[in-house]
Amino acid sequence: MKHIVNRKSEIVNEMTLHELNILSKEELKQTLFKCCGSDNWVEKMLTIFPVDDLVELLEDADEKWWQCSEEDWLQAFTHHPKIGDIESLQKKFASTAQWAAGEQSVAALASYEVLEKLAKGNDDYEKKFGFIFIVCATGKSAEEMLQLLNARLPNSRKDEIQNAADEQSKITKLRIEKLLA
């Protein structure tokens, strides 16, 4: 397993596919849980190891995600900080904070006004749907995320749970790729 230092001087664990394949069951569970915070998804993923290549792993990760229930999806959503919520990112999500911070790094460059609107939009979203706004934030500015949040607020809960699950799937695959970078 390699350790690299990213731009924020944090240690990020990387591993090869071989190293992932030979982890103990408990270590593999913990590692997969960092990619997606659904217990059921992790249990489903344990059945596919060892895997031959990254493409197969990503395809299986997606397939197992869509076999999960709405309850499993909601559990995974609870393992994300609200977009722009640095305090919760540091406290609650220490094990994935470096990934989430990188995913949301552009949001940190936003104006105070945009961050306030994101915070209010997040609150409105959570009150309406019962879960936080999930978006694959990588490469998106705070303004883009705010536009997406505002565009999704009028949706039905049925549509929005599907949108959030789609975004979680993207996030999970990105985290697997980062793990094996």
Image: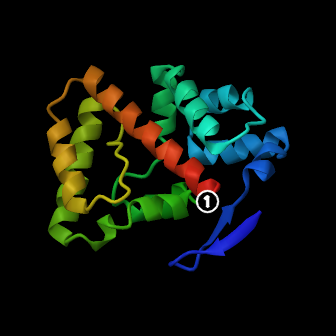
Left or right: where 176 falls relative to 139: right
Q: Is residue 80 left or right of residue 175?
A: left
Residue drawn at (45%, 58%), measured in percent from left and top? Answer: 88
Number of dots carrying numbers:
1
Image coords of residue 142 (percent x, y): 24, 61
Quick check: 179 above or below 58?
below
Task: Residue at 82% x, 46% y: name it.
Answer: 23
- Residue 41 falls left or right of residue 129: right
* Residue at point 66%, 26% (across, down): 44
Where is residue 6 shown, x and y percent of the image?
56, 75
Give the residue drawn at x 57%, y 51%. 177
Residue receiving disc 1: 181
Q: Which kind of residue does numbered mark 1 sit on?
A: Ala
Mark 1 lies on a secondary structure that is loop
State whether residue 110 appears in this view.
Answer: yes
Quarter of the image with the C terminus is bottom right
Residue 113, x across and y down, in percent: 15, 67
Q: Is residue 2 above or below residue 93?
A: below
